[in-house]
Amino acid sequence: MVNYIILGATGSIGTQALNILRFNNYNLVAFSYGKNTDKAIDIIKEFKPKYVSTNDTLRIKELRSLFPDVVIYEGNVGNNKIASLYKGDAVVINALVGSAGLKPTEIAIKNKNKVLLANKETLVIGGEIIMNLAKENNVEIIPIDSEHSAIYQLLVGHNREEIKRIIITASGGPFRNKEKEELESVSVEDALNHPNWKMGSKITIDSATLMNKGFEVIEAHHLFNLPLDMIDTIIHPESIIHSMVEFKDYSIFAQMGSSDMHLAINYAINGPTHSKCDIIKPLDLTKVSALHFEALDLTKHKLVNLAYEVVKKGSFYPTVLNASNEVAVELFLNKKIKFTDIERIILKEVNSYDHFNIKFTIDNILKLDKNIKEKLRKIYS
């Protein structure tokens, strides 16, 4: 029986991953979570893992009292410890949010465990290092993002030389038809009201700004080892086609499905077999009235364009992009800045970054990430 480890088990992706494990009667041996201890208690009771890590320091004594046979770790150190378990004998599902997912991914790879990756920041800020490390350790990294899962599925049976380009679809978010001036007054509640997907708050805001699409371009660049001129983005409001691959004979393959992350998670866990999973919401083509496509204007959507630019610059520039975005989204969710300030803060931070001659390592990425976040929080506190 395969041992599964979930990092971020109580979040949106973690919860859906647990649904897939439950459906298949798979073995959860360890997980980490933030502060939703009530939900974590239910998970421990049901799946009976041997190891757990929590950020809820106020309730860690309670957990240890309730589950004396479970080893309880704490904080980021605990996340790293969970990722280091079962050397060569586990599958690690990284469903953490933000740069916190980078170090555990590195640890899991060095531990020679297969990684199912939902934490896009791992590849955004450390893609070159992570992909080289995976190759050195002969470790598979399987994407859980719906767009990258679609591309991953479409490329089965094909080689890189056949590809003309990949096409990443974007719904356009809740403000697709709004003019720039109208965005000045949008509320947090408006931005969290995604037309198609039910996701965590951070990724939902990233979808509203389209920063998420920029991150997906960077992910695809590293994950599929493709140059930027072979990665296109397109608006597809229905979110029925999750991504497309155009081959050199100009045939275009599309992966279609409902707006349900269970689909990508199930394929990551059970692929390359398309295994039966009744909890996935089926797509009824008779109820799909039409599929629409629009060009994604990179001059209008500056954050997507910025993602292409930071990849070209390389080194720590994607780290600056991600760190400033994480803080800007946090500030907006806490109603300390306007929605349009997110883009302004990110652009200012990336454009003002002075690239010092620092060795490009995981530890230095995380140091810079921390410094930028502390600076921006201080400015806007």
Image (cartoon, rainbow, N blue to C red):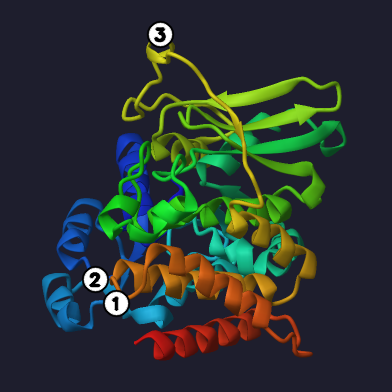
Question: What is the CA distance from the residue labelled 3 to the residue labelled 1?
Answer: 46 Å
The front one of 36 and 305 is 305
The front one of 153 and 247 is 247
Which one is closest to the eye, mark 3 or mark 2? Answer: 3
Mark number for residue 55? 1
Tell me which label, 3 or 2, sits earlier in the chain: 2
Question: Which residue is disc 2 drawn over?
Answer: 35
Is disc 1 surrounded by few (<14), some (14 to 19) or many (20+) residues within 10 Å? many
Quarter of the image where the N terminus is located: top left
Which one is closest to the eye, mark 3 or mark 1? Answer: 3
The image position of residue 265, as x and y in percent, is 45, 41
Is disc 2 surrounded by few (<14), some (14 to 19) or many (20+) residues within 10 Å? some
Q: Where, by quadrant of the figure, is residue 161 drawn?
A: top right
Tell me which label, 3 or 1, sits earlier in the chain: 1
Q: How many marks?
A: 3
Is residue 338 depicted above or below 4 in this figure?
below
The front one of 188 and 276 is 188
Q: Are marks 3 and 2 in contact (CB under 8 Å)?
A: no
Secondary element type, mark 3: helix
- Name the residue type under label 3: Thr
Question: Which residue is disc 3 drawn over?
Answer: 286
- Name the residue type under label 1: Asn
The image position of residue 212, as x and y in percent, is 52, 54
Relative placement, left or right, of 367 versus 98 is: right
Question: What is the CA distance from the residue labelled 3 to the residue labelled 2?
Answer: 42 Å
